[in-house]
Image (spheres, grey):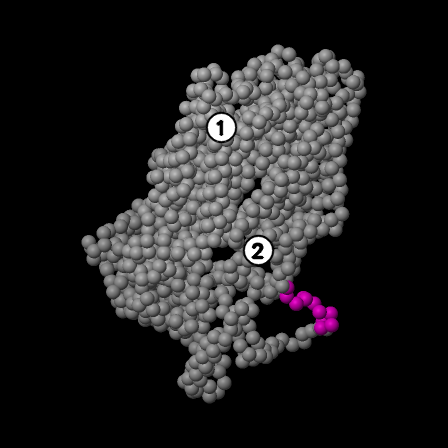
Amino acid sequence: MESPQRTSSFLTGMSGFVSQSRSFSFQSIDGCFLLNPIFLRFFTSSLHLILLVIVFISWLYKKFRSNEVERQKTNVRHISLLYYKPTLFSCLGLSFFNLILCLLNLFYWYRNGWSDEKILNLLDLGLKTIAWLALYLFLQIHLSSSRETKYPLVLRLWWVLFLLLSCYCLVIDILYYKQNQILSSLFWASDIVSLVMGLGFSYFGFLGKKRGEDTSLQERLLNGGASNGGESNKPSKGNETVTPYANAGIFSLFTFSWMGPLISLGYKKTLDLEDVPQLDTPDTAGGAFPSLNNKLESYRGGSNKVTTIMLAKGLFYMIWKEIAVSAVYVLVYTVASYVGPYLIDSFVQYLNGHKEFKNEGYVLVSAFFVAKLFECLAERHWFFKVEQAGYRARAALVEKVYTKGLTLSCQSKQGHTSGEIINLISVDAERIGEFGWYMHYPWMVILQVVLALVILYRDLGLASIVGLVATVLVMLANVPLGGLQKKYQAELMKSKDKRMKATSEVLRNMRILKLQAWELKFLSKIMDLRKVETGWLRKFLYTRAFTTFLFWGAPTFVSVATFGACMVMGIPLESGKILSALATFRILQEPIFVLPETISMIVQTKVSLDRIASFLSLVDLQPDVVEKLPTGDSDTAVEVIDGTFSWDVSSPSPTLKDINFRVSCGMRVAICGTVGSGKSSLLSCILGEMPKVSGIIRLSGTKAYVAQSPWIQSRSIEENILFGKAMDRQRYNRVLEACALKKDLEILSFGDQTVIGERGINLSGGQKQRIQIARALYQDADIYLFDDPFSAVDAHTGTHLFNECILGLLDSKTVIYVTHQVEFLPAADLILVMKDGKIKQVGKYNDILKSGSDFMELVGAHEEALSALDSIDVEASPSGEGRSSGNSKSVLQKQESRNDRKDKADNSGETKAQLVQEEEREKGNVGISVYWKYIRTAYGGLLAPFALLAQILFQILQIGSNYWMALATPVSKDAPTHVRGTTLILVYVALSIGSSFCIFGRALVIATIGYKTANILFNKMHLSIFRAPMSFFDSTPSGRVLNRASTDQSTVDLNMASIISIFAFAMIQLLGIIAVMSQIAWQVFIIFIPVVAVCLWLQRYYIAAARELARLCGICKAPVIQHFSETLSGATTIRSFDQEPRFRDISMKLIDGYSQPKFHTAAAMEWLCIRLDMLSLVTFAFSLIFLISIPEGTIDPSVAGLAVTYGLNLNMVQGWVVRSLCFMENRIISVERILQYTSTPNEPPLVIESNRPHNNWPTQGEVNIQDLQVRYAPHMPFVLRPECT
């Protein structure tokens, strides 16, 4: 009994408060009733009753005037009263304090008798609790956005009266104590707290003015004299304000109350991205990236090498505060979680009548309550902190990879595909961000095992060593399974990468496949790749089923081994010690399962760090290739002296050599030469894109570049042309005219606001090139570099562009253009003739035409090509048509004019809509039909009942085995033994084996359901997509399809079945716990039923916002990847315009746009969980108080101890039920998104038997077109009209 004695002595000091609340008779001091503490309690209760009436009347008054107040609000800015929040939470705290005093007295006096004095005291405390709570609600509802500049006068006067009365009561307490040498601690605590609060309320009430009272006149002055206040009265958008987390107080941070406004808004309306507040600066990419970047720069010195250690150290330095704080939370959580198992034996002995000191029961209940409270709070903040650190690390890594992508040399890019680089941000950065969950597990597992061993050794002696060995064996058994899982997952990811690569290629070239009717052939190839993937998927799922079996069976195996060792060693088993051990085994379940997963995650994170570090070590563009001269200091625009350049620096033969030329400001320089002569490379070396071997490049002024292959962003035409510049309408119109774009914009339904589809799908090659030229012209740069942009347009348009752009708008600019069209050469001030990487000739057109053979060859080849085309035209024309070419031209022009007018008329009558629509997003609740479809997909849903039955049997057998151990063993050493030791262990082993088989069968059934359902949904979605019409692919960016085929399909493959099953099994486990607890105290339902109702209401209140935040996460991830992909393909253009800072800013905004819903999703989950934990803690505390309040001998102490053992997990399981429900509703969105694409409208059947042609069809090749009407999509205008015959 030494250990219980130590426990009791440790807790003895905590019993003082309640023990002093014993019965004693109050007497007046000196016979004056005004000095009687009982009279004072009556007076204070009356005063609080008056407060309650005042609050009620004020509430009614506010209610009736609410409409008038709302009308008057419009001209005043709402700012909280000064000290409003401290006042609010002081009221709530005072109410809670009086409630605690009331409950303590209620339970104490319930056991020790009643009296009129005690009833009056309880009435006083009860009225105080209700009055202060009512005042809190009144302030919260009516003064949070009130126009009043001060608190109501009646309330302020009442606060002063409350302060005076508190002082008076405290004086009476002192006098009474001096006279009688005794006074309840209750009165001391109540009066001292009331005095402090009274001082606070009086201070708040008379200094509580508005911060900066604003009138409509002040607002008009602040808004620059605006005549109407409409703009100022608009509610601020969420994305225009910083998250309340940034300025939240301690109470708000601990309870996550700062999330309340967003969850409330989500409950009232469907959340959009603009409703989600911005992140605080440290959590943004702009705040996190500089810290990581500066550390990496300092670590690597002057070298370009980034090692894995450097990257890990940089990340640690960036988030070390979050790591340190979360480590403290983990320590508190771990220690607090073992307090319950440590005290169970003492609790059972107390119920059995072995009391070590007075009020031991209340002390034990308080210890249980405080430990669970600390455990819940620490766990919630641990989870949130590591998620916050993970989001910050991910944002910094993504931005670092993006920045590196902007500076990569061409040689580095050749060794890495865009897909591989994008995987760094979509997979590796995400994995590193998720590592925060596992960061503390290595040392936490050791601490958990040590604490468990201490408790087991106290209860079971040397048998605890056997328990430790059994624990280690189970952990070791997890290692090979973890290794297999890792192997299968790696193979699964490889096969998935191959499938996704093939799917991406097919989607990019779907038009060709549709035109050739090859789509089903390529679908079969993707299905073959999927077969390989599902082979690994099957192995992975069934291996995970074994791991699940070990997870649930581990406590059973360890307990059987430990209790068996007790029987062999002759260690007596008592119910209290067994229950303590069972609770400890249940906690050990976590480290047993987590350790192998943690090791696997460490390995995966190391691989991701290696991949990113390797990428960051790639060679960048040489920063000093181009020597930039100040603008206006020299008349030289571009100069190259003795330049030697090579795409491959290690190659012995450079790409360009002996380059010498000088371009003065305002010159037009043409570069010509045969294919492969180095024309484009010459422009690249001017831009600094090509590695310099030797020589000097000087450049003075800003530059603009037009690439040979157009690079267009998936934005509106206007945004592509402006390219970050402010709108100058006059210049903009001149540029459109010069680039012949006005006619194109007139045809488009939305003009220059038309959003360009992915890869310019809704523009012709000539249109894309002209937009690219317009982008360069609008920049108003000093130097223009054109890489043969006129080759993508017809001769007439090319001539127009040359005349209007190069000879027109750019007449005073320095222009260097590459061209194959000889007719553009005479306008050049200088011509460079390239051959074999050298400048062979330099001069004006007429000079080099006379002096060199190389230029003559080019001119001669061009004239031969033109004459050949002319001869083809003449041969193809019937007699007499040549003479009427002028008339034909005029007829064509008239017809074109008529068609243009008709286009405009027709388009005006059609519904206008962009080709690329916003991604479809379901809103509101996920329909029950989605769950029903998922469950019924595999085998018609026949396997689902078997999984439920297996779990129910597991729960029954597990509870039965614990009941058996609790009832069959004596409560103490003195009690008689009911059964023999061998019978005790054999029955327990039999029940444990039965429960293990049930859990194993359940795991196999769930794996089968998940595997079969994933395959069926995959096949349905892909068949529907491949049979979709071409308009679907024109209007749907491939990223949306790939997102469903990768991210959503992965969720369905790996997680969906287990997520749904976890919710069902958590519900069964919760019902089992309540059933056990109700066996000893059915009264627990008095608390449990309303608590469950509140939990369900909280879940419904929370899920509306959480569901939309999860959907926003899915939608906001694609723009980050798309922007990165666009940047990689257009990096040369971006650098040539010196637009890197702007694109980095866009990247940071997109990263923050993705992090915003992720951050608030995590916070919303913790907001819910902490409230669920508190509610379940109320249920647990009520059951404990009931157990110690009932007379001894009413219930069996062993059964009561078993109820407490299960009750220790009540908050976890109750929170688990709601969390799994929320998690399921978030993840079922993936199924919902896949089902969207399984119902995509399909093309007509490939073969119609009634219209099948003969085998010898066609007998001759002929195409007849009659009244053909074609448009990109049903909501788009016609591109071919009925006249097309």
Residue type beneath disc 2 = Glu
* The residue stretch that appears in magenta: 1242-1252
Image quadrant where one finds the C terminus: bottom right
Q: Is residue 53 above or below residue 675?
A: above
The mark nearer the N terminus, 2 or 1, is 1
Horizontal side, residue 209 vs residue 575: left or right: left
Mark 2 vs mark 1, CA separation in Å: 64 Å
Residue type beneath disc 1 = Phe
Asked whether residue 280 is drawn in magenta, I would say: no
Q: Is residue 824 above or below residue 286?
A: below
Tell me what residue is drawn at x 33 percent, y 48 percent: 213
Q: Nearer the viewer, residue 535 or 1103?
A: 1103
Give the residue at mark 1. Answer: 39
Pinpoint residue 728: horizontal percent, then vertical percent.
31, 64
Pinpoint residue 1202: horizontal percent, then vertical percent.
69, 26
Residue 566 seen from this side: no
Secondary structure beneath disc 1?
A: helix
Residue 1167: mark: none
User: How many numbered marks have been drawn onto this rendered protein structure?
Assistant: 2
Q: What secondary structure characterizes most of the magenta part?
A: loop
Horizontal side, residue 1097 vs residue 824: left or right: right
